[in-house]
Amino acid sequence: MKSLGIFFLTFLFLFGLLTLPGGEVMAQTKEIIMGAALPITGGQSREGGYFKKAYELAVKEINDGGGILVKGYGKKIPIKLIIYDDKSDNTTSVQLYEKLVTEDKVHVLLGGYGTPLITAHTVVAEKYRVPYVNGGGATGAIYQRGMKYIFCILSSVEKLAHTLMDWMALEQDAGKLKKPVRIALMGENTSHGKEFRQGVLDRIKAAPARFQVVMDEPFEMNLKDADPLLQKVKAAKAEVYLADARLADYTTMHRRYTEMRLYHLVVSYGPRGGEKAARDALGTASDYIISCNWWHKDIPTAAAKTFADKYAKTYNEPAEWFPATAYETVRVMVKAIEDAGSLDKAKIRDALAKMDMKNSLVVGGRVWFKPNGQIDNDYVMMQNLPGGKVALIYPKEVATAKAIVPIPQK
Amino acid sequence: MTIDLPALLVSATLLAGLYATMSYGLALIYGVMKIVNLAHAGVMMWGAYVAFVFIVNLGANPFLAPLFIVPIFFVFGMLLQRYIVRRVMFAPPISSLLLLFGMWLIMQNISYLLFSGDTRAITTKYTLMTFQAGGISISINRLVVFFVGILALVVLRQFLGRTYMGKAIRATSQDGDASKLVGINTDRVMEIAFGMGIALASLAGSLMALIFAFDPDFGRSHLLKGFCIVVLGGLESVVGVALGSLVLAIAEALSVLWIMPAMQDFVSFALLVIVLVAMPGGMAGLVGKFKRN
């Protein structure tokens, strides 16, 4: 009877240890599972490939150091990275994130690439309350859905537009652009393009003495004929030409812009400009185009340079912004786990919300999130120069040259 | 805001040449075989990539490259018809639609495999080259594409009107059984017609690659435009296709005077619906009616 009682008490004690809060401390966790579904094939395969390489590079680095130090376990735990191919398809992406959560039992999720895919699959992370960080979907609308578990280290497209306009204001104050300046504005008919146009219009409205909009038009992607649109640009007699377009449309539009011998003091296609494919396609026509981006390999900070060198050495290709933000996504998640001291998803989520990571490779060097989960750092602005070169022109802390404004007329 | 109307109309006319070139193949295949070639977009895309290989990798002259590309795709088209499409010729229409749609997806995936999803563009010494005519800046590339469109129309008209095979194609499209009765090898005719349709699509793709950037998804929106043009022009008439291209290109260009450029595609599809309801024979049918009256 006495031995039965001791057995029963021992059983209760062990049961309590395993099931009560803090029971995880005693459970053996051999690895921290991070999962992502990336467009390895399909229309976004180029970007997806960069993300995969960067995730693998970051995880390898951390595992080479023993893994992530999780205070609650009193030790470093290595990462197991699971990457699936969503084939650039929304439905597949959602299914794979479900799989990562329900079958692979990931602790945390890393983001994919591209606004449509991210808009779709973030619902899964939020539904299952799994912390999710991405460096591939900047459209602000993604983060205005009241989600608590979704974080992004890319500033919004609206911020891109604001950065561009704030830079123009500085150029006006330096006497290189007139006041007010007349702007022809266009954007693809997507959330990305609408956000860009709205961001520009916000600044125009706030500073009518500086900016006037003389044309504001959306256009459908995959332009077959840019002429009617550009005829409107020509008729608007603007001094500044701002457009938000994908690579293919940017190439089509700017070729036609050049053939029509249009000229503006400042030309920008938002984040497009310095891509090799575009510079090859446009040749000297791409010179002096201004662009805004989330990162550039020439940013003169130790963190940016270290990553650029590491990536180039590992993969024998220069680092573009895609792998940079993907790499930093992993580092941010690692820091969140370290700060949480636990693999409890709610605690990791809280750690992300309170994140203040310094010495980051992002512009400004600091990662912190607004209440909606998106970062709000400045963009780096670049200008294409003749000979295939690129100069960083803004912000002042990262600039490598002064912008050439107005664009020299040919 | 005063739009330069003459420049707009010139640009639209040049674009019509491109539209026509990309639609002839669709019209020919439908006219003879009564099947809608959904693989047309895939062939245009492959035409663009083959042009890329010839011009960028092998250094061929961009305007001569189609001379090599077209025969290759003609043979490809004939083989495709003989060994695959012929098997569904007399099945319900859905079978050929699905088959050719499947072919398109296969072609896309092969392109992703070989070329990745990167956007490509062909840059030659003629890219961005223009000349001024009456104050209007005209692109050399677009002018060449326009003239190729005219040339293709003339050659097709001559071929269909004056050669034995051309007449056999027209006879088969009018009545396949009667054609057999008079000794026409209709299987051979369909092979050749399909081959020509594929060759024309590849010609369009190789020329479009000089103007547009492209990736494995290239051609999708052009295919939809092609349907509109073929319906507008009259489903089986190459002259109708040329006229339909001109009407559509001008309508789209002028529409921006009143509506947003983002709505341009709406113009194409609105015209498609109107023509299907009010003028099922398209412009060719309308012209035919006038002649009879």
Image (spheres, rainbow, N blue to C red):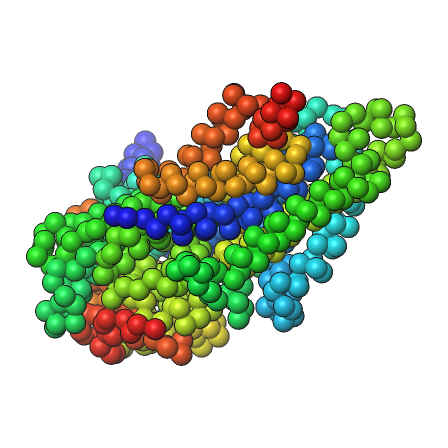
| Quarter of the image with the C terminus of chain A in it | bottom left
Residue A172 at x, y = what percent? 13, 67
Q: Position of residue A325 (x, y in %)?
A: 33, 62
Q: Nearer the viewer, residue B78 or B96?
A: B78
Q: Quadrant of residue A122?
A: top left
Q: Going by the image, does A193 lie left or right of B178?
A: left
* Residue A211 image position (x, y, % from top left): 14, 56
Q: Relative to A350, is B138 on the left or the right?
A: right
**How far across and down, in percent of the image, does residue B112 sit?**
57, 54
- Any part of residue A273 in sight: yes
Q: Nearer the viewer, residue A352 or A16?
A: A352
Residue in view at x 47 percent, y 69 percent: A280
Q: Residue at x 65, y 22 (%)?
A: B292
* Visible residue check, residue A355: no
Count of number-bearing discs: 0
Instruction: Say which quarter of the image contains residue B96.
Output: top right
Quick check: A212 left or right of B55?
left
Q: Is residue B61 left or right of residue A407?
A: right
Query: Please, is residue B33 above or below residue A213 in the view?
Result: above
The residue drawn where x is 53% and y is 34% is: B228
| B134 is higher (above) or lower (below) than B237 | below
Residue found 56% across the figure and 48% down from its top: B17
